[in-house]
Image (cartoon, coloured by chain):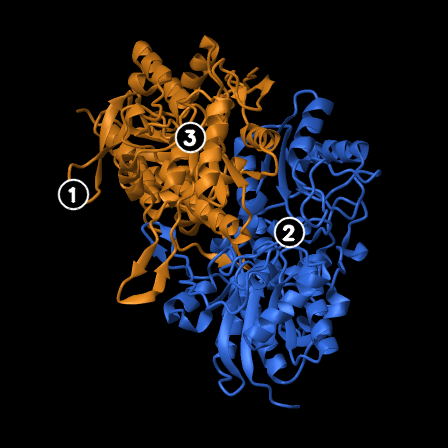
Chain colours: A blue, B orange
Amino acid sequence: MSSLQGNLLVAQSGGPSPVINASLAGVIAEALKHEDEIVEIYGGLNGIQGILNEQLIDLAAESQQTLRALSHTPGAALGTCRYKVKKQEDFDRILQVFEAHNIRYFHYIGGNDSQDTAAKIDALAKERGYELRVVGVPKTIDNDLPLTDHCPGFGSVAKHIGITVRELSLDNAAMGQNDFVSILEVMGRNAGWLAASSVLAHRKEKRDDRNPSNTHYGCNAPHIVLLPEVPFNADNFIRRVEEVLKNNEHCFVVVSEGVQDATGNYLGADTTSTDSFGHAVLGGAGEYLRSLVEERFDGVKARSSKLGITQRAASHNASKTDVDEAELCGREAVKAAINGESGKMVILARSEKENYAVHTLLAPLNEIANGVKVFPEKWIGEDRMSIHPDFIRYALPLIQGELQLPYDQGLPKYAQLSANLVQRRLDKYVTV
Amino acid sequence: MSSLQGNLLVAQSGGPSPVINASLAGVIAEALKHEDEIVEIYGGLNGIQGILNEQLIDLAAESQQTLRALSHTPGAALGTCRYKVKKQEDFDRILQVFEAHNIRYFHYIGGNDSQDTAAKIDALAKERGYELRVVGVPKTIDNDLPLTDHCPGFGSVAKHIGITVRELSLDNAAMGQNDFVSILEVMGRNAGWLAASSVLAHRKEKRDDRNPSNTHYGCNAPHIVLLPEVPFNADNFIRRVEEVLKNNEHCFVVVSEGVQDATGNYLGADTTSTDSFGHAVLGGAGEYLRSLVEERFDGVKARSSKLGITQRAASHNASKTDVDEAELCGREAVKAAINGESGKMVILARSEKENYAVHTLLAPLNEIANGVKVFPEKWIGEDRMSIHPDFIRYALPLIQGELQLPYDQGLPKYAQLSANLVQRRLDKYVTV
């Protein structure tokens, strides 16, 4: 392994997660330890888009307070983008920027689209003989990246959904209305991991035999979970709601934004609208089910909530385990690059121990890029609308632990980078 | 004042709030101190409906752990109802149940509809010469009860909305998309207090002159607040969005579920559906604005979230100040009844001191019942879509302080009453 001296560039991409900034903090913390190899630590604003525009900031100039607060701050401190690099000129420009600023270490924190971009940059640098080490850091609340046991970001949003379902079910139960259907729409795109995580709210009612007046809250909500992996059938759904209402005062339904019917149409989606990657804009599944229930049943009331983007920004409910693992992935990416690795992404592997533990490995970027790990068939219940308890064993360790957020006048204190721009060395570049 | 010995009955009504159980805990704690007057402490299940059905439980039999955990538990531990007592037979039955169980103290925790019922029970007892003391405990997240400075429940949901807006705005800012409109729909029915509380997220960006690299996060979201007190005009709204987008990358809109157009139609509401009090079922305002924005602007993207019932169940974000005041109202209601008061509700008055402090007073139930305190004209900005800073001075003290929730396996531990039923003494009663 040859030692490589130069500057490090880190950027964030795609939808923010509650812990994408924790990964950034991990990258910076580790980079500061390698003075011999890493001279300057730069951040690219708004992902690859800012890199194309040569908008780099000096991360080593940030205060220690800011860097410490990053790990509990939602959003993406560097900014992200959904710009898909396709043109050869874009890739050429990226290498020009890297050369102009002597970037030798590049860490892209993002999902599969982002790691695809990282893979292409790595390949181009090799082709051109530009010495560069590219090690990706995984990020997606959807938990749909291949090879890794789970993705940083998933645990925190799963925890937020678990808390929300439990609280909402207490409200529903209190209303004492018969024939009430409560609907919660959650994110996840084409993978059902987040919808499935709602069953983390399940808890058996416990009575203490020695002290029967001491009862613990039991929660059997959600009763129905609709996954994108299972084509939606209105008749089967309505039949299942009917069954649940026979044995319960209310029926709690969790629906993924990505559920489609047998012909591939998203429930209640605006099919005319797509994002810049050509994905359909999702969002109306909960309202669709509410009107379906009220239309099919006489006298049954339904209400729906849509957490929308608030769920991926809910750092106040972040899982400590998730935050720690996100930082770990950032640190390990830098270590791997220092050790001569490139064209890889850090992944999490679960240790074969009785108590939960993880270690990191490296996987080729090419095998991550554009792959999707859907919710596994083995964990989908027989009725296709419930989740196997083995999933709880998988997911429960990921939501453990809480952060102690600092508060200022009643609201959490979040960090903001002072973002000192690095002097430009190239002419302007116009992206289309 | 004559001393009155007998049993106490407490019940909860209307939509739950994050602190309705804290008021219940306050009633129980105070009642336990008055052994000479209060013999048994009963809870009525599902509000007046359970009282009609003689479903009373023995609250003194609950464990200390359960009572302590009540104050941070969402929902309504006794259950609530939306049953509107209208028939004379219902009122007769209520008095029969009171007589059969020697109820001499009655505390109804609820909003204006509930205090209306309490007022009628008080009047009937006086008419029949049945010695009874009725003192109501205020509860509503909508903050729309007259006479009281504010209502227990409001501060916690205001805090949750403030936190949500701040987190969501960080996510929006990170996306670095030009021409993006973010929409958050909140509750509040016909009063704009909760929508207005979103401006608690506003914070000036602070730079420390001695240490310019230490920056605090600044937040100017929300940019537009749509209140039910202001008739909605699509052209004015679109013009305002356009203005905001000139100076900002994105535009953050908070809309109350209760916003109506000039002809009195709720935005995107299902006008065919009403609840049991005849109120229209609200809910589509956010989605309506999203489609309006995308229709009127070319290339502008919009996303909406609807917190729905989750916002009033979000005990994990409860305000400590609000929880303490909710308990105080419960305790003071019992004290007032012991002191011979009846036909009153506890209200909160703000002390004329530099630092925030409250004390309680009593107001006649008749003046509370069915009154609505809308968001005051003086705090609506000149453009009719913003909030005057004086409102922040009013609301900021109400969101101060956080609870330290106990957690069990990654989720908050909430209480459940063991709910031991008191032996029935009357025949069954059929409510319609």
Residue B379 or residue A235, whichever sits in front: B379
Kindly indicate whether the residue at mark 1 contacts the one at mark 3 (C-beta within 8 angstroms): no
Instruction: Find disc 3 in the rendering and name its residue.
Output: B11
Q: Is residue A81 above or below residue B137?
A: below
Residue B183 location (% of width, % of height) = 52, 37
Position of the C terminus of chain B, as image quadrant, is: top right
Is residue B42 shown to the viewer in this render? no
Residue A371 location (% of width, % of height) = 76, 60
Query: Label 2 is found on which chain of the structure?
Result: A
Position of the N terminus of chain B, as image quadrant, is: top left
Is residue A185 shown to the viewer in this render? yes
Q: Identify the residue shown where x is 84% and y is 38%.
A: A263
In the image, A394: left or right of B328? Answer: right
Can you tell which of label 2 and label 1 is closer to the viewer?
Answer: 2
In the image, A81: left or right of B253? Answer: right
Q: Which mark is residue B66?
A: none
> The disc labelled 1 sits on which kind of residue?
Glu
Q: Identify the residue shown where x is 52% and y is 72%.
A: A26
Marks 2 and 1, how far apart at CA: 56 Å
Query: Label 1 is found on which chain of the structure?
Result: B
Marks 3 and 2, how far apart at CA: 63 Å
Instruction: Find disc 1 in the rendering and name its residue.
Output: B354
Residue A331 location (% of width, % of height) = 56, 75
Please tell me if label 3 and label 1 are on a single chain.
Answer: yes
> The disc labelled 3 sits on which kind of residue?
Ala
The crowd level at tag 1 (other Cα within 10 Å; few <14, some 14-19, many 20+) is: few
> The disc labelled 2 sits on which kind of residue?
Val
Marks 3 and 1, how far apart at CA: 36 Å
Instruction: Find disc 2 in the rendering and name its residue.
Output: A432
Residue A107 or residue B414, whichever sits in front: A107
Q: Which residue lies most toward the right here?
A: A263
Q: Secondary structure at mark 3?
A: strand
